[in-house]
Amino acid sequence: MTLKFQIRVTRRIKEGEHVPVYMRLRDGVACDQTVKTRILVRPEYWDPRAQRIKSRCLCPDSEKRKLTDDILTLRSFVSQMYYEKKSTEGKIPADWLVSIMGKYYKTGGKNP
């Protein structure tokens, strides 16, 4: 199972505009789902290879820490829920990631 975070820029972005971060969950051919998160980032700050804010950008430290914490918390939550679901049922439904994102934001990232 792999979780990747990426941004999609399909139009011209104005200076200082934020775009959402997408999360992609893949597990071979059995599961390939993508969902938009509520995490926002400026495209010029994003490092697609490292899947985080660039280490040498002129981004405020508070924004860098918050984004990093949000991504790590989300990654941990989804991984834990995925392995629980996989061990109990063995198969992941097609809309599972969307429902988990709703649960994540509803509970504030705490496992219910």
Image (spheres, rainbow, N blue to C red):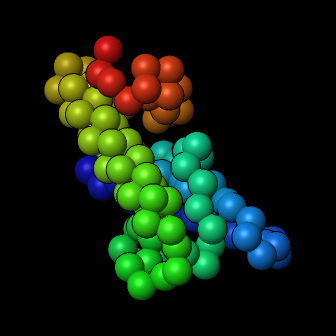
Residue at 35% in and 50% down: 69
Q: Is residue 94 visible?
A: yes
Q: Is residue 99 visible?
A: no
* Picture quarter with the C terminus: top left
Q: Nearer the viewer, residue 75 or 27?
A: 75
In the image, taking residue 3 as reference, residue 53 lies left or right, namely right
Quadrant location of residue 7?
A: bottom right
Residue at 68% in and 61% down: 18
Please identify the residue farthest to the left as the structure is shown.
87
Q: How many marks?
A: 0
In percent of width and height, residue 54 lies at 44, 78
Q: Nearer the viewer, residue 11 or 105?
A: 105
Please identify the residue farthest to the top as the structure is shown.
112
Q: Nearer the viewer, residue 108 or 26?
A: 108
Residue at 33% in and 24% down: 110
Q: Nearer the viewer, residue 23 or 47?
A: 47
Please identify the residue farthest to the bottom as the structure is shown.
56
In percent of width and height, residue 57 lies at 49, 82
In the image, taking residue 78 as reference, residue 32 lies left or right, namely right
In percent of width and height, residue 46 lies at 52, 73
Quadrant location of residue 67?
A: bottom left
Residue at 38% in and 79% down: 55
In the image, taking residue 62 as reference, residue 15 lies left or right, namely right
